[in-house]
Amino acid sequence: MKFFYYLILNFPVLLSAQIQPITQTPYNQNIVADNAAIQNVITLNKTFMGQSKLTGIFAANNYQPIFSNTEKWQEGSWFRGYFTGNEGNYGAFYNANPDVANTGRWSCHPQPRHTSKQIRAMIHFDNYYSNSANSPEIIKGLEYLISQQVNSPGNNLTDGGYIYWLGREGQDIFEQNDIPGNLSQNKVHVYETSSALAGLCEGYLYLKKNNIQLPNNLYESIVKAANNLYAVDLTGYNSDNYVAFGLWGLSKAYKITQDCRYLSKIIDLGEWLIGRQSNATGICNGTWPHGDEIFMNEPVYHEARINYHVIILRGLTESFDCIPKSNILFRQELLDAIKKATNHLIKYRVNYEDPYLPGSFFGTVSTYYSNRDCEKLDNLSFSFIYEDDIVETLAILAYYANFNTNNFNQAEIATLRKLLNIVSVHAQTRIDPASNVGVSPNQDPFGENQRAKERRAVQQMSSLAYYLDYTKAIDNNTKVFVVDNTNFFDSNRTSNVVSLDVNNDGIKNDIAYFETNGDKTFLYVANVANTNIISSVKKTWESTGYPLDLFSDRVVAGDFDNDGKYDDIAAVFDYGNNVTKIHVFRGTGSGFEYLGAGGFWSASGYDAKLLGDRVISGDFDNDGKIDDIAAFYDYGNNETRIHVFRGTGTSFEYLGADGFWKNINYPSNRIISKVISGDFDNDGKNDDIATFYDHPSSNEVSIDVFVGSGTNFQFQERWRSTGYPFSQFNNRIVSGNFDNDGFNDIITFYDFGNNETRMHLFKGTASGNFSYQGPNAYWSSVNFDSNKIKGKLAAFDSNGDGKSEIFAMYNMPNIDSKLQTFKNFSSGFELNELSDWWNNLCNGYLNTQAGNLTTRLFSNKLLIKEHTKNSDETKIYKNEDFFEVSSKSKIKNIQLFDFSGKMVKEFDNILSEKFRFNIPNNGSYIVKITDVNNKNSVNKIIN
């Protein structure tokens, strides 16, 4: 058999020497969707929902199946579990008695993984067609999965999990309910739980994307399933591919919940898989050479089976999209493992024979390729595995590579797409029942051949769905799910920023902003130390039902509860259909309390979209409190009015549609950038508003000031110029006392082109006018694109001296946006910035001065910092000849497991804070340590 190999992926020099050059195959054709065939298989798919229950097998009549005329499985379920795989061969199903002790007979209960897979297939087809045509069936499937979730509070190893329905209790016993029975094999399993969790997560995102009401408890079920996977320690995962299932499911859940406990577990599981991947030269490089199996009379590695290899690769790939991009070291380790595993596929497992030869096996994959000595098998077996996970694995790998061009070069991205095309080459034809083998005539006494073909077409439809959806996203540079590629801080996903005094120390040196991952919204606070360095970033609030795009440009700070502290936030929230509410987040001294969806003010007939970003806080009623809000409302036909919402401490009072100012020849869309407030008439009151205004007919720009009186605004033009085009500083304006003379000034970040930016000062004067200080900047740079800070500026005071400094967010493509501070000196400003900083820690708090590098492995030092609650109490050290356990409490028992879960050593009745032990064989092990207080910790060691 002739093979045409092609370009292999690059990875570090140490590894690249192990790979030989590979010739490229000329094949690179995309699959073209056959819409009629797709709709046909979707229709067939729905006929396998809620099937009649199997009640018996009539062995004397050629094993004829007997189905109930009245009882069916719940409508949202698919297939009949293990029985489905034996339809057409009922004798094998009836007589099968697996070798493992006490398994009983094969189950005929629907498996959660099958339901999840069919749900996900319809989701991806709907995504591809940009509709929600299959939402009724998807919802039924989700409701079924929710109903199947185990509810056992107090037992975190079963609560929230899903049962792997493996056996039935006897040859003539056919379970007709959801009770596992007395069989230990029918138990919660990471395989089923992770598979169900993937369906729950994708269903949740699909329904929200299409504005369809979620089934009851869907989000809660996601959390419960993820909590179950989080609770399982490594001994409970049992095999490499089961670890990969857990990694996959937790990664799906983490991207929705942003629960960093899951992230810590993802890193834990990922490190384990990386540590077990082969670095040997030759065929086994990049594989997981573990587990004993016999294939075609040859001893092989169980985990090297193609199905399991791609399952592990899928878990690593999905987790790569979770690990913060600031965690450069671990991401590189993960990337190396992904590329090695992919290179193994490319070089050894895919059939590249001429696709145009009759009977070609082009695009198929070898079940196994080598024996346990890493020698090529004499007889290779090639097949389609569209019922399993290979197309999805390669699709998400190509998809995520497209977002990570700093990790994958263009040649690698092109290679991944080609590999996906090759392996998916038959995915379109396999959804046609006529292209599938049914059952042989001697196994088909009941005329079910056509139904068997239909079933196999349905079971393979997900591969085509994955291919079409992910390649569409790649080609259009869009996302399949909104939470994808959100593992970094992106200032384009934040609200405008405000400065305030969150910690109530009397200094306005905190910066607050809302951020979203596309689904969930968070409220963060960055604190600036008196050195003008950002000292910390803290997550203070989060919600799944608070879409950022409905308020992101209308966030202001003030003292809205009238407690004398400038520590509250108000957001003008657009509910659609001309319904607007003003929500308040009350400062608590350490964070914020959301005061409810009812808000401090609400109205029908008031369209927040007509405010744009022209909303500001101040003391517009002159009561001495910064508790009012002013908004420029666009009435159309060039008319603008300034509405005022007077704060009372518990609400806002709308002071009328006429506003404090109105003009029928002042179109609000000519206001340049966000409006700013301050004391621009030097009367000691923060009751004035200033804005830059565009005059297109004369090609001029002016600074307009609306001078407050407590009951209205008086319009005054304070500065005008023909040589200051607004496009060069639009949305890059900030006000404060920058020259420390006690008067409010304005600074613009002026774009001179070619990445040159200059900071211009408009100096406030005693007369209330603004004096432009000219093009010689207070700060300048030839490597600063001011367009990247648009709308992300705020003035603050780092040390309480009354002199204003500037905070900015500087957007970077596909990596962390920089947090910047401009320290104010008498001669100008000095830029300090924080890059590669974002990491969603469990307590939501990042001390940026201390750094955020993750704990790594060092020889002869602490092996690993555990992520368990007892991690600080028990540690393991390695010397040249032994391992030493050190514990704050006396150690009672130590158990040593290999990765199959088999206990290989136990040390009991130790009763000491320290204990040394040896391991005779090299390998990876799990150490379970129990102290005298019965507290457990689980550690990983490599000998």
Image: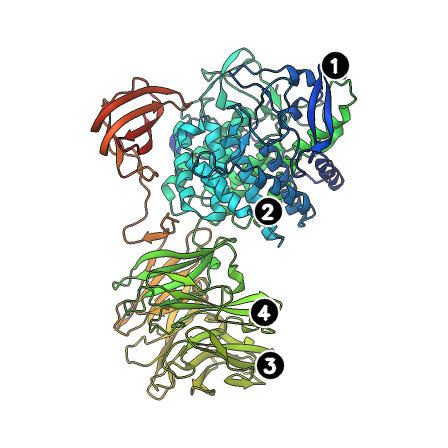
Q: Is residue 43 above or below residue 912?
A: below
Q: 624 or 126: which is nearer to us?
A: 624
Q: SS of the residue at dot 3? A: loop
Residue that numbered label 3 is attached to: 638
Q: Amino acid at mark 2?
A: Ala
- Mark before the other along the chain sequence, 1 or 4: 1
Q: Amino acid at mark 3?
A: Asn
How many residues crowd around disc 4 within 10 Å: few (fewer than 14), some, or many (20 or more)?
some
Residue that numbered label 2 is attached to: 473
Q: 92 or 524: which is nearer to us?
A: 92
Counting the numbered discs, the total is 4
Q: Amino acid at mark 1?
A: Asn
- Mark before the other along the chain sequence, 2 or 3: 2
Which residue lies most toward the right here? Answer: 447
Residue that numbered label 1 is attached to: 62
Q: Is residue 303 above or below residue 42?
A: above
Q: Amino acid at mark 4?
A: Val
Residue 579 - label: 4
- Mark before the other along the chain sequence, 3 or 4: 4
State how far apart marks 1 and 2 are (Cα).
50 Å
- Mark before the other along the chain sequence, 4 or 2: 2
Residue 796 - label: none
- Asked whether residue 408 appears in the rendered view, the answer is no
Q: Which of labels 3 and 4 is toward the front?
A: 4
Q: Residue at x 35, y 60 (%)?
A: 526
Q: Position of residue 121 (x, y in %)?
A: 64, 39
Contact between marks 4 and 2 (CB within 8 A): the answer is no
Specify whether 649 is left or right of 362: left
Q: SS of the residue at dot 1? A: loop
Q: SS of the residue at dot 4? A: strand
